Image: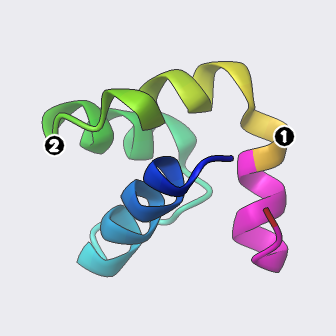
Amino acid sequence: MDKKVKEQILKIRATGSTNMFDVPRVQRMAFESDFYELVCFLDEYRKEYVQFILTGEE
């Protein structure tokens, strides 16, 4: 996970608007925020995303 994707995840989380395990909702919020790198990351690396949410490890 690169720095830009991590920052985008943290920005979505900071809104408090969704459960971060609701991946379709996170992806929709990312798209609406023009976080296209995160949208693609969630399509390709969902396991790594969930691991980051659970543990904070990249």
Where is mark 1, residue-wise?
A: 47
Foreground residue, 17 or 57? 57
What type is the residue that disc 2 sits on? Answer: Ser
Q: Is residue 50 left or right of residue 39?
A: right
Find residue 9 and report its horizontal and vertical position in percent: 46, 59
Where is mark 2, residue-wise?
A: 33
Give, as a single range, the part of the protein colored magenta.
49-57
Q: Marks 1 and 2: CB-CB under 8 Å?
A: no
What type is the residue that disc 1 sits on? Answer: Lys
Name the residue: 84% across, 40% down: 47
Element on which disc 1 rests: helix
Find residue 46 and report its horizontal and vertical position in percent: 74, 35
Name the residue: 62% across, 57% down: 21
Find residue 26 and report its horizontal and vertical position in percent: 42, 46
Q: Is residue 20 left or right of residue 49?
A: left
Main SS of the magenta part reads: helix
Find residue 27 and report its horizontal and vertical position in percent: 41, 35
Foreground residue, 58 or 42? 58
Measured along the vertical axis of the image, is residue 41 above or below residue 29?
Answer: above
